[in-house]
Amino acid sequence: MTAGRIAEEGARLLGEGLAGWRALAGGDLSRVVRARLSSGREAIFKTGPAPRVEAEMLRAIRAAGVPAPEVLGASARVLALEALADAGGLRGAGWEALGAAVRRLHGATGAGYGWPEDYAFGAVAIRNAPCDDWPGFWAERRLLTEAGALPPEFSRRLERLARALPERLPARPAPALLHGDLWAGNVLAAPGGGLSGLIDPASSYGHGEVDLAMLHLFGSPGTGFAAGYGAADPGVAERRPIYQLWPAIVHVRLFGAGYLGLLDRLLGDCGV
């Protein structure tokens, strides 16, 4: 859909007229529009793999007491969201606020691992059917789902690691609510550098260290994050590359062979 069509469909979804709109940059996997409605309020309208599924993820994040945009409406094609402040990156105490928010998020637990519905990063499916134990979930629903589309050497290394996961990962950690794509671009900052909210989730229930690993993949969070989040479990550094493999695989599949070096490095860090 064009940006103009997204704005029109979003306004209709909310039963309002459209006073104006502008496309927002930065969305690799969806198109995003900020619209001014006839009532005078502003809203964000976006496409995505499954707007109604994303709506449920955002509702779960907000129910955990974590700042995220309110869902104003959702159809099969468009998600309508509250327009949160977006004033650049976090600064100072904003990082500590993010740490505390992610700790609250991970304190919301589910009955098991996964999510009621599958999701996607663009053309890459995110399989969320439950597994009895966490190593099995991470192997079967994440690391191996795209292995057949990778060069054979990488597939073989992933299969070796998957067989070793029962000795490398906790068998049944608390099934924490995960954001699922927690990098700096999905954290909005308020004026002054405070935390405005989390956006663009790919949520499931799993080991909370999955979010921490993603947050460290393309940089490091500010120094206050650890103070806000609290102490990590022993062995977090050894598990981090195992959890970073999934977003690395996604980047290879979506953006090409330029990310194979990252995948190779992480597999080496995992000892395979």
Image: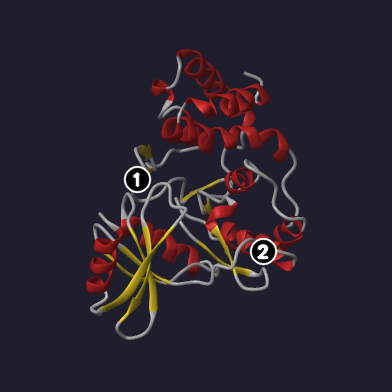
- Compared across the picture, whether 258 is left or right of 270 comes to left
Q: 114 or 44, which lies in front?
A: 44
Q: Check the image and report above or below for 143 versus 21.
A: above
Please say whether residue 120 is visible from this viewpoint: yes
Could you tell whether 150 is left or right of 75 in the image? Answer: right
Residue 57 is marked as: none
Picture quarter with the N terminus: bottom left
For residue 29, above or below residue 148: below
Side (left or right) of 243 relative to 54: right
Q: Residue at x 65, y 21 (%)?
A: 268
Instruction: Name the residue located 47 percent from the left edge and 53 percent from the top edge.
Output: 26
Disc 1 marks a residue whose amino acid type is: Asp
Residue 130 vertical position relative to residue 48 in the rendered view, above or below: above
Residue 136 visible within the image = no
- The answer to which image quadrant residue 144 occupies is top left
Q: Residues within 10 Å of mark 1 (few under 14, many from 20)?
A: some
The amino acid on which the numbered mark 2 sits, given as a three-letter code, is: Ala
Instruction: Please give the name of the residue rendered at 70% of the width and 47% of the height, measured from the top-left corner.
Output: 220
Give the quadrant of the C terminus.
Answer: top right
Compare marks 1 and 2 and give the one earlier in the sequence.
2
Q: How many marks?
A: 2
* Along the viewing direction, whichever of 170 and 184 lies nearer the viewer: 184
Q: Secondary structure at mark 2?
A: helix
Q: Secondary structure at mark 1?
A: loop
- Residue identifier under label 2: 100
- Kindly report the distance in space between the C-alpha atoms of the residues bearing marks 1 and 2: 28 Å
Query: Quadrant of the rendered structure where residue 253 is?
Result: top left
Residue beneath the point at 36% across and 85% down: 40
Residue 194, position in %: x, y? 66, 70
The label shown at residue 118 is 1
